[in-house]
Amino acid sequence: MRRLALLLVAVLMLAAPIAGQEDGLNLPAELYTLKRDGTIQRIGLGAAGVSDVTPPGALTLDFGLSPDGVWMAYRTDGAVGLYNMRTGEQRPLDTTGASYPPYRGRGQSVAWSPQGDAVAYTTETGLRIAVLDGSFGDIVIGPLISLNWSPDGQFWPLRPRTTSGGSTAGSRTAPNRLSCTRRCPRRAGQRGSAAVC
C-alpha cells in the first residue's frame, strides 16, 4: 500500500508542471516559420495555436516582421510586398528591382529597419533598401548570404559570399566574417542610390 501511495505522489508531482503550462513549447514569444511549400505559419502562445499567415496568393521565398509585429515584408520570385497581418491589406513594395534571393535558406534576406520605416533585402548584386515613402537605394557589393540592421539603424551587418579559395567576393573582409556598411544620409530631395555618400 505504501508503495502505491508513493507511486501516486510521484505521478502527481510530475503531472503538475505539465498541467500548468499554457502551450506545448512554452514559448516566450510567437514563432514564425517558413515552410518548404512557401507558406508561413505562426505558432502562437497558449490557446492561439498554429495559424497560417501567408499573404493571399503569394508563394513566399522569405519574410521579415516589422518591429511592431503588424506588417510582414515578404518576397516572392522577383517582387517584395507588404502584408498587414491584422487587416489583410497587401501593398507592393518593389515589383521591378527585387531579384530572386541569391542564397535562399542560408540567412536572412529581408530585414526591417528598427524604426519600421524601411525594408532592406538582398539582391543579385548586393542589397536594396526600400523606404516606405517610396524611395529606393542600392548598395552594390556582390551577392550576400545574410543581412540585418544595427539597433540604431545606421549600419547593416552583412555576411558576404565566400569563394572556394577563401577570399570574399565583392568585399574586403575576411572569409566568413561580418562586414558593416554605413547607411548613407539622404540629402534633401534626393531619391535613389544610397551607395553614394
Image (spheres, grey):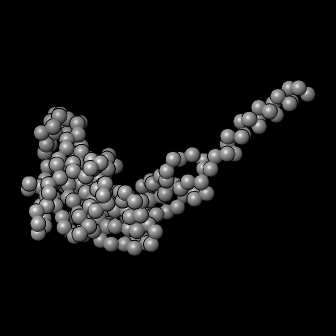
Q: Is residue 55 left or right of residue 45?
A: left
Q: Quadrant of the C terminus?
A: bottom left
Seen from the viewer's position, the closer of residues 130 and 133 is: 133
Residue found at x 71% / y 36%: 14
| 108 lies left or right of 166 | right
- What residue lies at 19% left-to-right and 41% top-to-bottom? 179
Q: Is residue 100 visible?
A: no
Please provide percent x and percent y for residue 12: 77, 37
Percent position of residue 130, x then y: 23, 63
15 and 118: which is toward the camera: 118
Residue 146 x/y as whole percent:
27, 47
In this view, 173 is above or below 1: below
Q: Where, by quadrant of the figure, is residue 134 drawn?
A: bottom left
Which quarter of the figure has residue 98?
bottom left
Residue drawn 49% across the image and 63% down it: 52
**Residue 83 left/right relative to 142:** right
Residue 51 seen in this snapshot: yes
Q: Position of residue 80 (x, y in %)?
A: 29, 65
Figure quadrant of the N terminus: top right
Q: In percent of the image, x 40 and y 73: which residue is there?
A: 89
